[in-house]
Image: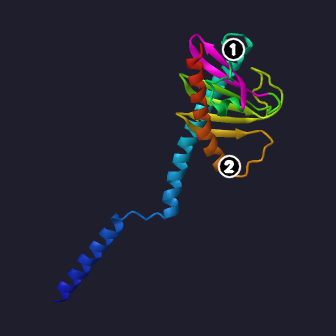
Amino acid sequence: MKNLISFSYLVLLVLTVFIFGCKESPKTDGEKDKTKVIDTTKKSNTNTDEIVAKIQKYRADGEDKINKKVFTKKEYSLKGDKIKENISQKWEKMDAYFEGDKLVRIQLYPNKGISERTEEFYLKDSALMFVFIQDKGPKLEGKDAGLPGKEFYFENDKLIKFVNTSKEEIKNLDEEKKMYETRLPYEVKELLVIINTTK
């Protein structure tokens, strides 16, 4: 009987060591989540930074081509029966810049006496990539990079980066981003209709 009790204790001891020895030391929720968040953030930021850098280069090349007069520039009046009221109330004219038959850049100019705001759009294969909004200041076509304003970087009609160097105070940044993410791609689509239907 003594041997049977000793054998039972031995089996119990071996099973206990086996069970706890095979178990991985548990990580706290903070440790698990922290690792995942750091990895995801790094990949996401790296990817976003690379995309933004490509867009910045694309814009810089475009501004250089404007200064060297590489693009073909066409001016469009934003007045008349065929122009939607929401466009004609704000904008007087639009300049469209083409490289060959591809539209690369659009510049909007406000109605005189109503506003000083200009909007500059860069597109690639009709997809919005970059928007620069300048509320006031010198209108230096092809030379406004680095001037105060709002910069919007897009990929697949999604706002991936917003830089505000204007002196305008933004009360709710998330709402502001959502509004521009919705409005700017839609605005470009409306302008493309005007360009494609005006001869």
Instruction: Name the amino acid, label 1.
Output: Lys
Q: Residue at x 80, y 31 (%)?
A: 116
Helix, strand, or loop for circle 2?
A: helix
In front of the other: 111 or 107: 111
x and y percent of residue 151 in the render? 69, 35
Which residue is the extreme one toward the front? 81
In front of the other: 105 or 191: 191
> Can residue 64 be seen at all in this image of the molecule?
yes
State the extent of the magenta-drawn residues as a range.
90-111
x and y percent of residue 157 in the render? 54, 35
x and y percent of residue 129 in the render? 60, 29
Which residue is the extreme one toward the bottom? 1
Return the residue at label 2: 173
> Can residue 160 be seen at all in this image of the molecule?
no
Q: Residues within 10 Å of mark 1 (few under 14, many from 20)?
A: some
Name the main secondary structure of what is drawn in magenta. Answer: strand
Foreground: disc 1 or disc 2: 2
Return the residue at label 1: 65
Does residue 105 show up magenta in the picture?
Answer: yes
- Quick check: 3 above or below 47? below
x and y percent of residue 75 in the render? 69, 16
Q: Relative to residue 180, is residue 34 drawn left or right?
A: left
Instruction: Name the amino acid, label 2.
Output: Leu
Q: Residues within 10 Å of mark 2 (few under 14, many from 20)?
A: few
Does residue 52 show up magenta in the picture?
Answer: no
Q: Earlier in the sequence, mark 1 or mark 2?
A: 1
Q: Relative to residue 42, is residue 22 drawn left or right?
A: left
**Image quadrant where one finds the N terminus:** bottom left
Q: Residue at x 68, y 13 (%)?
A: 73
Q: Residue at x 33, y 64 (%)?
A: 22
The alpha-carbon separation of the residues under discs 1 and 2 comes to 34 Å
Residue 92 found in image quarter: top right
